[in-house]
Amino acid sequence: MLPYTAYLRVYHPITAFSSEDQAYWRAYADSPDRPRRVNAVAAEHRESLRRLVATPPIPAPRYESRNAYVRRAGDELYICPWQTRLRSWLGLREFRSETPTQLCPMFIPEAETEAAESAFQRWRERGRPLRTQILTSTWTVPLPWFVPFDSKERCLVLGTEQDQALPRGDAGGYGQRPTGGAEVNGGVYESAPARTLLYVTELSSAMSRLERAIHVLGESLGDSTPLRSVEQLEDWLNGIAHPEALLELDYGGLVHLLDDEQLRDDESVAEVDAAITGLETGQDELTMAMYRRVTQRWKAVQELERAN
């Protein structure tokens, strides 16, 4: 069972990497042995489980992962490294900040935690990057994550025979379709595709939508939690994204909490955009209606975390 986690990923063009890394990632992208997109999340999950069930548990791998998510758009190659070691360090810090001090050793021995912290400290002292190209969210999709996308950039695959074609194209034309088999005859697949809901857009479009939202929220709500949340997302992208990058929102394991009808009816991106438009044009009833619709949908999903 995959974790009920959604992902926001930044894919850099291959030209954004050093010449040495470019050679590695080009060979990696062409390798028949690398985890394909349909299996990559599961491969990440298996790798993490192996470390956590070890004796003693290994909170962060000794070396950084050399795996990545790969996308192609025409002749262009885009790479999103897993950054497993860095993400593990940051996840460990988050875990320790949210868990009572006396309980932490029950999950990870103090000696292993200290060793991971020491390795992270050496990483920072060498001036290595501290921001990842992947954000994660368990049991829900944060509302700001919908802002950078357009509803036409949605890619939905339900994995059933009648839904094997992507109803809105290939997520704006960026990269391989998320399937477990080859595409033939205009969207019919030789084997069942993976259950997927994702959005993909160019960074320039994402930043324009974020800037618009920040302006509208600032004018309408002033200094508020929604404004700060969108500003934090913009800051993250400004800090790590290449100007020609792609941004992907992947519902990941959350698709298994929603049935086919719920996924078809999920218009969260359009609803968030309509709520912002309502603020922009003074249509308060539209704003409240769209806000209630999208928040109620994701509140119902998040409540499943505590379901028996």
Image (tube, rainbow, N blue to C red):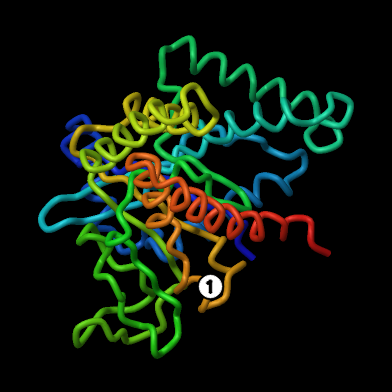
Estimate the x, y position of residue 100 in percent, counting from the top left.
84, 28
In the image, is 85 to the left or to the right of 79? right
Q: Under tag 1, what secondary structure?
A: helix
Q: Give 98 or 210, whichever is nearer the viewer.
A: 210
**Dot 1, how many residues are within 10 Å of its Cα: few (below 14), some (14-19), or many (20+)?**
few
Note whether 69 is above or below 217 in the view shown: below
Estimate the x, y position of residue 204 in percent, counting from the top left.
21, 38
Estimate the x, y position of residue 232 in percent, counting from the top left.
45, 27
Identify the residue at horizontal 43%, vertical 63% (top origin).
Answer: 267
Identify the residue at horizontal 53%, vertical 72% (top origin).
Answer: 262
Q: Give 303 or 158, whichever is nearer the viewer.
A: 303
Tell me the kind of residue under disc 1.
Gln
Identify the residue at horizontal 30%, vertical 54% (top origin).
Answer: 150
Residue picked out by circle 1: 262
Identify the residue at horizontal 43%, vertical 12% (top origin).
Answer: 126
In the image, is 37 to the left or to the right of 87? left
